[in-house]
Image: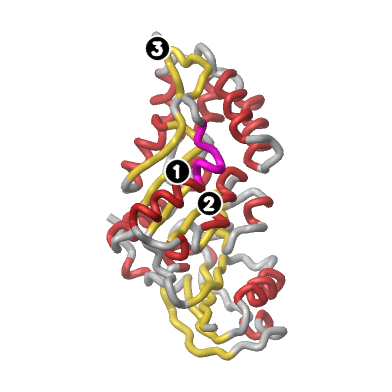
């Protein structure tokens, strides 16, 4: 089986010497080629009998390494569909927690968010509980939170625009709210977005969320539906997220990536991005830096 190991170091880290010999010491591999994708990223192409065996061995070798890496088959690296979580993945915050701040309840609500993202609470129930605590908050807080708190994470716009320019469909799928996903999707360049709806009346939040709630299974359904609409197999899809409600789509995608993720997600993903920015997902697909769309 022909595999490729991609390593990506953070720009601020400079050039790192990666000990491939030590990493492959316990593996029976045949090195075929080495390709520089940028000063921070490179591919190592090799033959090996088992992808899972290589992944497990490298996870041990690179456990404390200050760079991100991904190993996968060389065929089908460039994906036709990107499905991305929004909060703490494409953007820098959890929007519900920021709304809670305007209601004076951030600590209380953020604690529930953290437990839900770790998989300790059922997502749908936790969402209803947190939204209920915002009852009576002025809807003007939505725009205020977006303007004052929401920022695209580094590399997000480049990731989406580069994949879109190469005929991939890019969809933002969030357990958060359409008020934010619509704006974030436009800012980053996504083709479409799916999310929950905050119900309001007379300029105030009612404390209710539209049903059915988009959670873990709905994110998986979105991945399947978008792939079917494109006529592509799941092997040609890429999913990224950070919380437990992203796990099903991450496990189902051809390449499932955990971004600064909770342990339950990081343990199951095909690859992790813990050190570099979201352009790591482009390098994982074999894009060179000079192919990035940055405008």
Which class describes the residues within 10 Å of circle 3: few (<14), some (14-19), or many (20+)?
A: few
The N terminus - image quarter? bottom right
How many angstroms separate mark 3 from mark 1 (CA)? 26 Å
Residue 290 in magenta stretch: no
Report the side of 264 relative to 142 (left or right).
right
The residue that label 3 is drawn on is 203
Report the side of 294 relative to 202 (left or right).
left
Q: In the rendered view, tell whether residue 60 sits above or below residue 105.
A: below
The residue that label 2 is drawn on is 249
Mark toward the viewer: 2 or 1: 2
Going from N to C along the chain, the mark reached first, 3 or 1, is: 1
Residue at disc 3, secondary structure: loop
Q: How many marks?
A: 3
Q: What residue span does the magenta drawing correspond to? A: 213-219
Residue 216 in magenta stretch: yes
Report the side of 74 relative to 110 (left or right).
left
The residue that label 1 is drawn on is 173
Identity of the residue drawn at 41% across and 12% down: 201
**Which image quarter: residue 51?**
bottom right
Mark toward the viewer: 3 or 2: 2
How many angstroms separate mark 2 from mark 1 (CA)? 10 Å
Report the side of 110 relative to 173 (left or right).
right
Going from N to C along the chain, the mark reached first, 2 or 1, is: 1
Identity of the residue drawn at 50% across and 53% down: 240
**Frontmost residue, 127 versus 288:** 127
Is mark 2 in CB contact (under 8 Å) with mark 1? yes
């Amino acid at each position: 089986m022909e595999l490729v190991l991609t390593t990506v170091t953070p720009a601020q880290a400079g050039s790192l010497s990666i000990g491939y010999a030590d990493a492959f010491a316990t593996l029976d591999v045949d090195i075929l080629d080495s390709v520089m994708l940028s000063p921070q990223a490179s591919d190592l192409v090799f033959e090996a009998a088992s992808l899972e065996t290589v992944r497990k061995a490298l996870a041990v070798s690179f456990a404390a390494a200050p760079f991100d890496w991904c190993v996968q088959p060389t065929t089908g690296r460039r994906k036709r569909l990107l499905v991305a979580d929004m909060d703490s993945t494409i953007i820098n915050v959890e929007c519900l927690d920021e709304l809670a701040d305007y209601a004076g309840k951030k600590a209380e609500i953020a604690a529930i968010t953290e437990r839900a993202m770790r998989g300790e609470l059922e997502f749908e129930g936790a969402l209803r509980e947190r939204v209920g605590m915002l009852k009576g908050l002025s809807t003007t807080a939505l725009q205020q939170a977006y303007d004052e708190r929401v920022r695209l994470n580094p590399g997000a716009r480049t990731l989406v625009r580069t994949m879109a320019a190469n005929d991939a469909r890019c969809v933002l799928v969030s357990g958060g709210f359409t008020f934010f996903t619509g704006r974030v999707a436009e800012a980053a360049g996504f083709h479409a977005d799916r999310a929950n709806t905050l119900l309001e009346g007379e300029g105030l939040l009612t404390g209710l969320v539209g049903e059915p709630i988009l959670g873990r299974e709905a994110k998986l359904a979105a991945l399947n539906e978008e792939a079917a609409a494109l006529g592509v197999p799941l092997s040609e899809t890429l999913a990224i997220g950070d919380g437990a409600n992203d796990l099903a789509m991450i496990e189902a995608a051809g390449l499932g990536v955990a971004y600064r993720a909770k342990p339950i997600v990081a343990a199951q993903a095909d690859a992790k991005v813990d050190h570099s920015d979201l352009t790591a997902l482009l390098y994982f697909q074999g894009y060179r830096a000079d192919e990035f769309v940055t405008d």
